[in-house]
Image: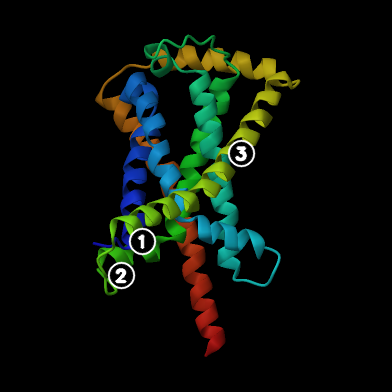
Amino acid sequence: MQSNPKLTKFAIAIVLSFGFLIVLLAPYTTGVPIHEWISLLILIPLLLHLMLAWRWIANVTVKFFKPQPMRTRINYVLDWLLFVLVTTATVSGILISEAALPSLGIQTNIDHFWIPVHAIASRLLVMAIGIHIAMHLGWIVSVFKGRLAIIEGKREKNSGSDTRASVVSEVKSYAAPLVCITLAAGVIAVVLLLFTQAPFADAWRIAGVEASEAARARPKGLNTTMTDLSWLTILMGLPTSLTLFVLYFGKRKSKTAAE
């Protein structure tokens, strides 16, 4: 049975949403091991999400300076911002790993410079995800209401050789996106590593030590969890609401102008 690309993207988006919800909670609320392992596992559906959207990304990249809807440009820039923030949060998270890497026998000498980098990237990521959700809310609602039609063409039984050829073709189609995504993430990682030698790096290390001590001193329990959830709701809710507000009045203005 053929899968519907839109429903596949939606399923991956749901997995990402729940994954990020857990990951973005403070690690000392969810527990450091859970926080770190889910952070690594969430990269798998994220990579699939990017690969499924690759055709759109490639088309907009080529035509970015040509006439096209403003909303398309905004979505494109926002997607790049999300990619940079996810890469920054992942790289910094790996470099301050206290559970995942040691459990694999990889010992790390933690540079406290990465603690404030990780915290800032994570907070900005929450806000960017809120905007991303608002920009695609119409699509999300249409799925829930069942308005996405699942159109299946006539399927013919393929021979074994045809099936193998199809698999090879599918693998090749994902090879280029995977290489490009890896290279882009690598460039961002190198730039981040260069910042460790910046004039402000030592000040950030001091801030990182203080933040680490403060986090460990936080009481664990329901109150801490609720506090983290409240801040997460505010950080994500405000950008989401403001974006929806702008989109709504922009749509009304366009409708009024057309009349």
Q: Identity of the amino acid at label 3?
A: Leu
Using the image, determine if residue 16 lies above or below residue 117. below
The residue under the point 54% across, 79% down is 254
Q: Which residue is mark 2?
A: 148
Residue that carries the numbered disc 3 in the rendered image: 183
Out of 55 and 83, give the one closest to the viewer.
55
Residue 4 at x, y = what percent? 31, 63
- Judge left or right: residue 33 versus residue 56: left
Q: Which residue is mark 1?
A: 5
- Residue 224: x and y in percent read 32, 25
Neighbours of disc 1 within 10 Å: few (<14), some (14-19), many (20+): few
- Residue 78 lies, with reference to residue 84, above or below; the image says below
- Number of labels in the image equals 3
* Quarter holding residue 43: top left
Tell me if I can see residue 239 in this picture: no
Q: Position of residue 47 (x, y in %)?
A: 45, 43
Compared to 97, does 85 lie above or below? below
Q: Is residue 208 left or right of residue 161?
A: right
> Does label 1 or label 3 sit earlier along the sequence?
1
